[in-house]
Image: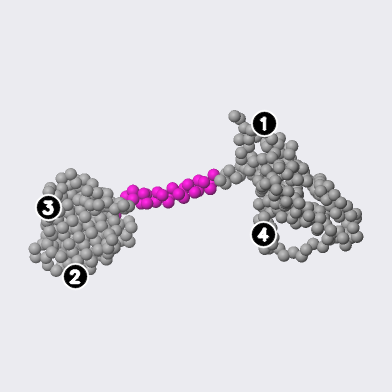
Amino acid sequence: MDLENELRLAMAEHVADATVGGSLAMAVRERHRRRVARRRVALVTAAVGLLATAMAPAYQALRATPAGDHRPLRPSLGGTAVPNAPAQVQPTSPGTARPAPSAAPSGTSQTPVPSATAPATTRPSPLPGLSWIGYLPSGLKAVGPCVQQSAGTRRTTVCRWNGSGTLEVDVVRAPGLVRAEQLGALPVLPRYVTVHGNRAIYLVRPDGGSQLVWIDRPGVGVIVIAGPSLSDQLTRIAAGIRP
Amino acid sequence: MRGRDDGSFVEFVAERGNALLRTAILMCHSRHDAEDALQSALEKAYRHWDRLEPDTDPEPYVRRILVNLLISRARRWRVLREIQVARMPEVPTTAPTHEVELRGTLVDELRRLGPRQRAVLVLRYWEDLSELQTAELLGCSVGTVKSQASRGLARLRERIDVTMTPMGR
């Protein structure tokens, strides 16, 4: 038996009636069109995903959200009284004739007086020198009087509290001070918020605390550093500061 | 240099579609699979159709795509079938004449060969390609084609002997 010949005949018999439909070329082109469309959709989806992944940190950094947006408790940006605030004072700009509050808010907490006497109280003092601090959480005690530091033309007032947490407020005065970045090192991926309409740099400190830095007006900058237990009230404290 | 246009693709499919489909059927287990494989192969060729030179024959290019696609699919299907379907070996049935039975058995046994061996036999004895052309198309050496063809035919002969002997051949 000639197997090769038989195989040829067998194959020819097997496929004798096989013919393609008249629309094969059209079907192929349609298949190609669908494939291209699928590929484009996949590419666009991948590109959007990549872009979103790449842009998220930048967007987060550039986004200027109102202070307190990321906090459960929204601060009073204008420094006005906050309902149920544990301690509240009327903000008064230092050196101005803004009146001190006629009466302290109700409550048992008392005002910290970072002055020479440094009484063991946690309520902001109505004294003219500290009335620019509008809100302090309860349970804070002034570490001591506010300290004045000078370096060249830069003058810094440093006030510290501790007790229910640690808090430090620095007011920096220097000619030419216009950008928050001039007040310290900028984090790699800073987050920006606004305090009284000013752009403020928010960052989380290595100890778990947080910090806000902003320029209140040209020549005057503020740094607020809250310990971990006061981090959730940082923006509220910052909103009450009117240096 | 201008490549092939869309119209030449339609012409090519109209002229060579049947031959390509028949090759695909011989290398497949079903006509449906063959048609699907042919469409896939043609679609692959269509992607680069405009890059093919107008004065060259596109059929070897398309056939190469088709054969490689069929071998790949057959390998995948073989694995899947072995996993999913445990069938008893087919029992030879009687046929009106020995010739018809022999040819039917040959095609059946051809399908039982490995994908590459089957491709060699189809290309050599259906497409009438030379050993060199077959080797070029499959991307292997002439020696491999020779040995695959020889082993494939031996296997067919052996299977035919086993199948046809009980019928008094």
The tag on residue A195 is none
Residue at image mark 2:
A108
The tag on residue B79 is 4
Magenta region: A40-67
Residue B137 location, quadrant: top right
Q: Amino acid at mark 2?
A: Thr
Check whether the beta carbons of the residues at disc 4 and disc 3 lie within 8 A of each other.
no
Foreground mark, 3 or 2, reads 3
Q: Amino acid at mark 3?
A: Ser
Q: Is residue A48 magenta?
A: yes
Where residue A51 sits: x, y (%)? 44, 48
Q: Report how far apart the C-alphas of labels 2 and 1 lie in the structure.
A: 98 Å
Foreground mark, 1 or 3, reads 1
Q: In this orientation, does residue A100 appear?
A: no
Q: Report how far apart the C-alphas of labels 3 and 2 lie in the structure.
A: 36 Å
Give the chain of mark 2. A
Q: Amino acid at mark 4?
A: Val
Foreground mark, 2 or 4, reads 4
Q: Residues within 10 Å of mark 3 (few under 14, many from 20)?
A: few
Residue at image mark 1:
B55
Q: What is the secondary structure assignment of the residue under circle 3?
A: strand
Residue A50, above or below B3? below
Residue A163, above or below B14? below
Q: Are marks 4 and 3 on the same chain?
A: no
Where residue A47 sits: x, y (%)? 47, 47
Q: Report how far apart the C-alphas of labels 4 and 3 lie in the structure.
A: 81 Å
Residue at image mark 3:
A150
Which callout, 3 or 2, points at the residue further toward the start of the chain? 2
